[in-house]
Image: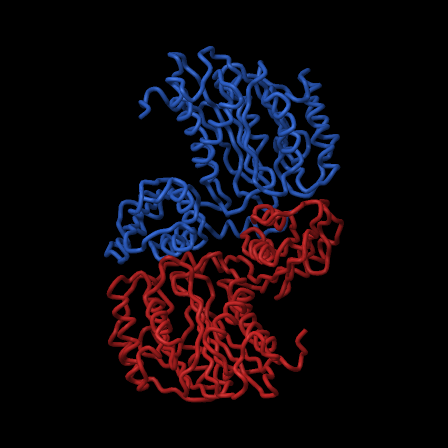
Chain colours: A red, B blue
Amino acid sequence: MVKEETVKPIKGGTILSPLGYKAGGLHTGLRYAKKDFGVIYSEKPAQCGAVYTQSHFQAAPLKVTQESISHSHTLQAIVVNSAIANACTGEQGLRDAYQTREWTAERFQIPEEYVAVASTGVIGEWLPMDKVKKGCSDIQVEAGPESAESFQQAILTTDTIEKSSCYQVMIDGKTVTIGGCAKGSGMIHPNMATMLGFITTDATISSDVLQNALKTAIDQSFNQITVDGETSTNDMVISLANGMVEHEALHENHPDWTHFQKGLTLVCEDLAKQIARDGEGATKLVEVNVTGAPSHQDANILAKKIVGSNLVKTALFGGDPNWGRIVGAMGHSGVELIPHQCDIRIGDTLVFSKGTPQPFNEEEVSGYMQAEHVSISVSLQSGKGFGKAWGCDLTYDYVKINASYRT
Amino acid sequence: MVKEETVKPIKGGTILSPLGYKAGGLHTGLRYAKKDFGVIYSEKPAQCGAVYTQSHFQAAPLKVTQESISHSHTLQAIVVNSAIANACTGEQGLRDAYQTREWTAERFQIPEEYVAVASTGVIGEWLPMDKVKKGCSDIQVEAGPESAESFQQAILTTDTIEKSSCYQVMIDGKTVTIGGCAKGSGMIHPNMATMLGFITTDATISSDVLQNALKTAIDQSFNQITVDGETSTNDMVISLANGMVEHEALHENHPDWTHFQKGLTLVCEDLAKQIARDGEGATKLVEVNVTGAPSHQDANILAKKIVGSNLVKTALFGGDPNWGRIVGAMGHSGVELIPHQCDIRIGDTLVFSKGTPQPFNEEEVSGYMQAEHVSISVSLQSGKGFGKAWGCDLTYDYVKINASYRT
C-alpha cells in the first residue's frame, strides 16, 4: 500500500507545476474567436512516452509524432492546434504536419525530431497553413498558471470545461511533481476528432520505463472511459519527463516506484473522469465497479460495457433504477459469468442478488440517481479480478449536439 | 442465381398463409388493455429449428423451449405472452414457464414437449399465473388473416407496427409458402426484453436441415440489425415446418434447395428490416453495404459497426453528410483495412475515396439523408467479401422513450 502523504493531489496544479516547463496558447484564426493554437515547451530535452489511437485511420500528426519519438525518444516541444483534426487528409495532410513540426523547431531552435504534433477538430479538412505558420511564429511560452490555462483553452473543441490535474510524490526523499491536462468530450465530436492528454513531470526516468508506466496508467484511466463507444482518429496521450529533480533514475525495482506509478495513474484517472463528466450533453459522471471477476481484464471489459450501454445511460438520465438494463449489458459483454452468483448494487442498494430480484425502495434509489456522481457496483463472485470504468448519461443534448449540422 | 418468379413475395401474407396453421391472440390482463397472450398451432406436429439469444442471462421460457425441442425436434404449438419477460426471475420463473407449457399442452391435447414458450416484456418481474392460466384456457386458434393479426398484436410491447412477411417458392414444381411475424423495437426496451420471430412453412424438411437453413437466414438478417447495440435476455426465433406440401424432403443437394433458402432468408430479412425501421424513436431505416472486404464475415462486422455507431446515427437524424463519423466507426471495427483504398458513398454520392475527401454537393446529400430509407456504401478494395446491415437513426425520442420511468 502507498501511504496517503507520499502521493498527494495538488489543488490548482497544472502541466507547469513540475520544474522546467513553459507553455502558451493563442488565437491564430482556425476557430472564430477562441484560442486554437498552443505549445508546451521543456527547458531541457525530456524523455517521453506516448500512446496513440487504435483506429486504422490514424491522423497525419500522429504519424509525424511517432516518427519524432522513434528518433531518440526525446521531446522538447509539443505543438497542438484545435478546430481541424488533419485526419483523412491524404498526402497533403502529412506534408502539412511535417511543415508544422519544422516551423515549431525553427521557432524554438531545437531539432525537428524533438517536436511532437497534435491536432483535434473536424475530420477531412486541410489545415490553412498560413494561419499555422502565424501561430508558430507568434507563440510565446511562459511559466505560471496563466500560461497553463492559455494552453488548456487552446486545445478545446466542444469541451465545456478545461481539464487539468496534478499530484506530487516522494522519490528518494525529494518531491517530484506530475501535472496533466486533457481535452475530449465525445470520443469523436459532432465531427470533431479527439481525446488528447499531455502529462509533464520533473522526474528522472528513461523513456522506456516511462512508456511502460504510462501504458499501465492509461489502461486504468483513459482506456476505461467511454462517452459514446467511439474511437477517434486523433486520440493521443504524451508524457514528458525532463529530469529536473535529481534522484536515482526510476525503474520498477526502485523503492519509491509505486509512488510514481500511483501518482501518474491518479493524474490520468483524474483527467479521464473530467472527460467523462464533460461528455457531450452529460448531466452526471457514472462510475461502474466490478469485483469478483475471473480476471482484472474481464472486470475492466464488463465495467466498460455497462457504462457504455445506451440503455443504462438513458436510465441514468431518467433516474430509473432499472437493473434489467444492467443485466442486459452484462449478458453480452463476452465475459463468462454465472447469473445466479451475480449481485448488482445501485449506490449502496442491492437490487439483484444471486439470480433473483431484490425488494428495494425505488423512489429512494431513483433519488440517488439524480445526483451528479452515480455509482453502480457488480460482484460476480467467480474470481479475484476487479476493475472500474467511467462514463456519463445519454441525454437529449447528446442527440442535439450530434444531430445538428456542422456549420 | 435464383430466378425472380421462383421466389416471390406474397403481399399481405402471414404466418397462416402456409397450409395447416392456426393462431389466435387475446387480452388476459398482463397489459392494461391491449392483447397480451397468443398461440400459433400446427394441425400436424412440425419439424422445427430455433435460434436463441447469446446473453448469459437467458430467460426462463427459452430454457423450457430448448428442453421441448431437444426431446424430439418437433413442435405443435408456440405460446407467447407480452408485458412480462420472465427473465432474471430465478427458480420461480422457471417453474412458471413449465406451468405455462403444461397448461398449453392440456388445452390442445398434445404432449408437453410439443409446446414452445416465449415471453417478452419487463425483466425481473414474475408472471401473474392466474392470468396466464386464464389465457391458456380461453385462447382460440383459427385460420385466416384476422387470426394472424390477432397473434401479431398480442406479441407487441413498445413496437408501433405489426411485422409480418411471406414468400412463396417452387419446390419439385409445387408451391411452398413461408410466412413470418416478429416483434422488437429496441434490443431491450425501456425495460422490455426482446426480439421474437416466428416462421411457419408447409415445406417438407427435417429439423436438422431446417435448423441449418434458419441459422444461415438469421446470420444475414436478424443478426445484422442493431437498434442500440444491446442483446436481450429473451431473443428467440422459432421456425416450424409441418410438411403439408408433399415433395421430396428438402436437403442441401435438392435441386430446388436454393429456392427454399432464399425464400426463408428473404422472410427473415424483411422482418429484420421492419424491426430496424420500428427502432425506438427512429425516423428512418438505414442500410449499410460493405463490399471488397477480406471476407463476408468482415463485411458483416464492419456494416454492423457503422450502422450501430451513435455518431453515425445522430448524423442520420440530423441529415448531416458527415463521413468523418463513418470513418471513425470503420477505424475501430477490428476489421483490417487500408485507409487509402477505401471508398465511402452516401446514397450514390462518393464522399471519400482512396484516403482523400471528395468534393460533393452537401445540400443535395443532406436532402437525400432526410428520406425514410438511407443507404451508405463502403468499398474496401481488399477482397471479395460483402455484407449488409440495417439500423435506424438516434433521435430525441429514443432518449425520451428510454429515459422515462417505467411506470
Left/right placement of residue A314 relative to residue A126 reads right
Seen from the viewer's position, the closer of residues A221 and A153 is A221
Residue at 52 percent across and 23 percent down: it is B208
Residue at 32 percent across and 47 percent down: it is B378
Check the picture and name the quadrant holding the N terminus of chain B. Answer: top left
In the image, residue B286 sits, relative to residue A172, either above or below, namely above
In the image, residue A271 sits, relative to residue A333, either above or below, namely below
Residue most extreme to the top: B246
Instruction: Report whether residue B375 is seen.
Output: no
Residue A284 spot, x, y in % from top left? 58, 64
In the image, residue B28 sits, relative to residue A211, either above or below, namely above
Residue A136 spot, x, y in % from top left? 30, 81
In the image, residue B236 sits, relative to residue A176, either above or below, namely above
Residue A351 spot, x, y in % from top left? 71, 52
Left/right placement of residue B11 relative to residue B231 reads left
Residue at 58 percent across and 88 percent down: it is A174
Residue most extreme to the front: A253
Seen from the viewer's position, the closer of residues A259 and A332 is A259
Instruction: Report whether residue A144 is seen.
Output: yes
